[in-house]
Image: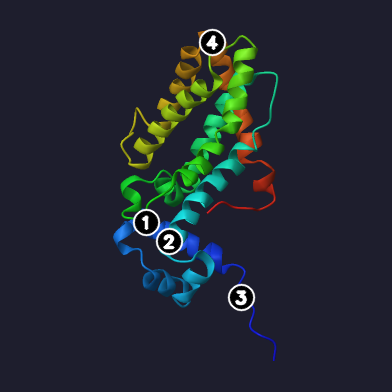
Amino acid sequence: MSPRKADPTARATLIEIGARLLHEEGPQTLSTRRIAAEAGSSTMAVYTHFGGMDGLVREIVHEGFARLEKFLTQVRESDDPVADMAVLGRAYRANALANPHLYTVMFGGESLGGFELTDEDRQYGRYTLTTVINCATRCVASGRFRAGDPVLVSHHMWLATHGLINLELGDYLIDPWNADTCYETQLVTLMVGEGDSLEAATRSVELSAERFRTEVEHGPHRRAGKQQT
């Protein structure tokens, strides 16, 4: 009799369960026993796939950023880099709303309890900003944004979008100043703040809404039936 093969989906299942428990119940509920029970496996599975709980939490964070990168890479480059930047912002937000259980733990802090991320782990997250930095470089080169450091520009975009998402996920943004309304105006304000004209920024942000629906919301990865969980 041949040896029993490991379930190829077990690793992904454990990550999903761990992320959900962190998101819904907090780090105090995270244990090999609890995760194994929910997965219908033995506690040894956590050690086999991740080397222990620290390894599992680290992979949860990495998975969150990997999914974010998939969203960002759906955005194509065009001759309107400011519209590209707005689509990237929309993609960033869409990932957070599609994966709230991962998003809330991607950046560490109290959501991880006693589980510590290393700077190497954080660098893994910073790497996903490369696409935004490249876009900011093109915005500056086109003359739409004032001359400056594209890395700083990308951080401005990150800070503002991340702040809105945190309020949105916490249900703080309600009608008439809901997240959709706030984000549309925030996108224009961000672009103008970096040097674009109000007229040009408004036009690019409006264009980005349709592009987001085509490239990200109903993009190739969606049409292929690959749903984010």
Identify the residue position indicated by label 2 in the image: 18
Q: Is residue 46 above or below residue 211?
A: below
Q: CA distance from mark 4 to mark 2?
A: 43 Å
Q: Is residue 70 above or below residue 9?
A: above
Identify the residue position indicated by label 3 in the image: 6
Q: CA distance from mark 1 to mark 3?
A: 26 Å
Three-letter residue code for mark 2: Gly
- Please tell me which of labels 1 and 4 falls first in the chain: 1
Q: Are marks 1 and 4 in contact (CB under 8 Å)?
A: no
Q: Position of residue 53 (x, y in %)?
A: 41, 63
Taking the image as shown, residue 77 lies to the left or right of residue 62, namely: right
Q: What label does residue 97 carry, if any?
A: none
Instruction: Please give the name of the residue rendered at 52% of the width and 30% of the height, measured from the top-left corner.
Output: 89
- Please tell me which of labels 4 and 2 falls first in the chain: 2
Q: Secondary structure at mark 4?
A: loop
Instruction: Please give the name of the residue rendered at 66% of the width and 47% of the height, measured from the top-left corner.
Output: 221
